[in-house]
Image (cartoon, rainbow, N blue to C red):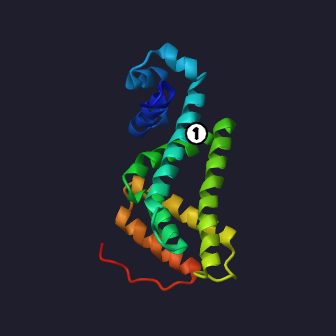
Amino acid sequence: MADRKTEILEATCRVIAREGADGLRMGTVAREAGVSSALLHYYFDTRADLLMQAFEHADIKADQAAEAALAGIPGAVERLRRLLEIYAGADAVFRDDWVLWVEMWRSAIFDERLAESVRRSSAAWIEQITDLLEQARDEGSIGDAIVVNDVAMRLAATVDGLGLQILSGITSHERAAELIRSALAIELGLPTTARSSV
């Protein structure tokens, strides 16, 4: 069974996913978690501290879910394709994580402490992509001329933008996954597939 702090962080993530960061009140989180406000303040000094730790908690859970989703997939290029698709929100588990990301990005503009947390998380996300690209190069699946750091940044930006479009209802999960496959193929010099009718 999860400890009390973890339960509070889970409750915080639910509140943010449902109401946004603006709806994050210590009292609302305490009710959601079924704990007293005093216990909430025991673990978290401020609302910003709660928000930052909830974001980091959600990030860890998303990374664990992604790792599980990639288990058993042969070939680094195919693992990378799957990683990019799921982080664009193609899997339901990542929808709430995306809401948290958007809220953190917005809040981080005005709070340097939150900005540092976002920078760390972004760097880790790009490193995940870079690692898979380097594995693909070691396997001989992609050419040595590919500048993996640049490709990783562009792919991360593509996924970030598509994730926002999915949340906003501008595009569908299916169309985003299609665009990600196309972007990956273009970046890596692989054959592209025809656009589906979805």
Residue drawn at (55%, 18%), measured in percent from left and top? 41
Q: Secondary structure at mark 1?
A: helix
Which residue is most to the left?
197
Residue drawn at (63%, 65%), measured in percent from left and top? 131
Q: Nearer the viewer, residue 29 or 81?
A: 81
Q: Nearer the viewer, residue 129 or 4?
A: 4
Give the left or right position of residue 138, taking residue 31 as reference. Answer: right
Counting labels gives 1
With respect to residue 52, does 179 lie above or below?
below
Report x, y in % for residue 65.
45, 52
Dot 1 crowding, Cα within 10 Å, few <14, some 14–19, many 20+? many
Query: Mark 1 — residue?
Result: 107
Q: Is residue 197 visible?
A: yes
Residue drawn at (44%, 15%), measured in percent from left and top? 36
Report x, y in % for residue 151.
63, 71
Residue drawn at (64%, 65%), measured in percent from left and top? 130
Give the left or right position of residue 75, taking residue 17 as reference. Answer: right
The C terminus, quarter of image = bottom left
Report x, y in % for residue 44.
57, 23
With respect to residue 68, does 139 lie above or below?
below
The N terminus, quarter of image = top left
> Quadrant of residue 176 in the image?
bottom left
Report x, y in % for residue 110.
64, 38
With respect to residue 180, does 6 lie above or below?
above
Q: Is residue 172 visible?
A: no
Which residue is most to the bottom?
191
The amino acid type found where label 1 is placed reads Ser
